[in-house]
Image (cartoon, rainbow, N blue to C red):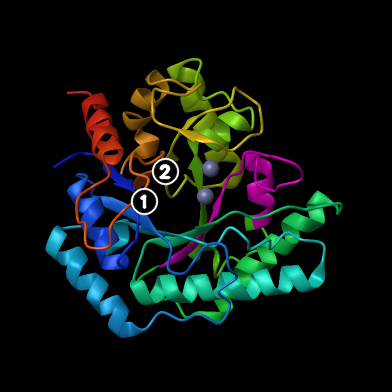
Amino acid sequence: MSPRIFGVHPADEGGLPMAVRRAAAAGARAMQLFTAPPTYYNDKVSLKPEKAAKMHEVLDAVGIAREHVLVHAAFVLNTASPEEPKALRARAGLAKELERTTVLGAWGCCFHPGSAGDGDPQEAAVRVGQAICHALKQVREVNGTRVLIENTAGAGHTMGRTAEEIALMLAQVPPALRHRTGYGLDTCHLFAAGHDLHTTRDAQHELLAHFERTIGERPAFFHLNDSQHPFASNKDRHALLGEGAIGAEPFRWLVNDPFSEGIPLILETPAARKIVVEDDVTADPADTRMIALLEGFLDA
Ligand SMILES: [Zn+2]
Ligand SMILES: [Zn+2]
């Protein structure tokens, strides 16, 4: 078995069990999914236990462990917003994300902290931290499911582009709940935000060590994406690994670095197929190719 837990975020046409089959077909040991349409708040949407049971059956059948499943929260949840109605609805949406993720028994749900808008970034970070606390208080802990902040590319006033900002958000969470939170790093977002993960192996390791020192823990997952836009562009456009501005070598370093051990390493690279038929269980050819590429990067 591969010493690294590589995963994909497959198309979910035909339902989540079909997404699981497509991930397995790509050769993945991990996967990411949406539990509800990501362009809506879904603050009233629950996941029925029967639906989760169906998922567990398929995960068991294909050999993907529940703790290698990551849920991506809706993109519209702006918990950092200075506009109170927006922030409150996002807070409710995040709690529901954690609820659905917990019913699924997944590793955690990751979310983008959102934008501070015209407001003060410090206050925005506090609001994001409070939204995490709210979710953790609303949803009882089962199977160690966590709420995970995802770093951002830093466009506009988006929060979470630096280790310091992530640390400030997580610092709002009381010590008793702190083990139920954490953060993950998207390589495209790191690069777009101006972090050096691409010049040398040592610089990359030092960058990850800086996040660990500043936040007090290691990242809980990685999103492995190359970038369509140049370094420090603040633009979030993913590319296939080795076919963007980051290039292949930094991914070879990363998958052999101790920081990537034992956690989901999820590809969110562009799919080759434009249309996926509901009953098609085959993998996207680009996903299969990316997983094979990553496996080939591993030191013998
Ligand atoms: Zn994301
Ligand atoms: Zn992205």
Q: Give SS at disc 2.
A: loop
Residue 275 in percent (x, y) is at: 35, 50
Q: CA distance from mark 2 to mark 1?
A: 6 Å
**Residue 168, how many percent across, how many down?**
69, 52
Q: For the point 35% across and 34% down, which residue is it?
A: 258
**Amino acid type of the residue that numbered disc 2 sits on in the rendered structure:** Glu
Q: Are marks 2 and 1 in contact (CB under 8 Å)?
A: yes
Give residue 117's position: percent from left, percent from top: 81, 52
Crowd tier of the residue under label 2, counting other residues whose Cα lies within 10 Å: few below 14, some 14–19, many 20 or above = many
- Magenta-tinted stretch: 145-169
**CB of residue at label 2: within 8 Å of ligand 2?**
yes
The residue carrying mark 2 is: 268
- Residue wearing tag 1: 9
Task: Please check the rendered image and state whether residue 161 is part of the magenta-colored stretch, yes or no.
Answer: yes
Question: Which structural element holds mark 1?
Answer: loop
Q: Give percent across and percent down for residue 283.
A: 23, 47
Relative horizontal placement of residue 61, taking residue 104 as reference (left or right) = left
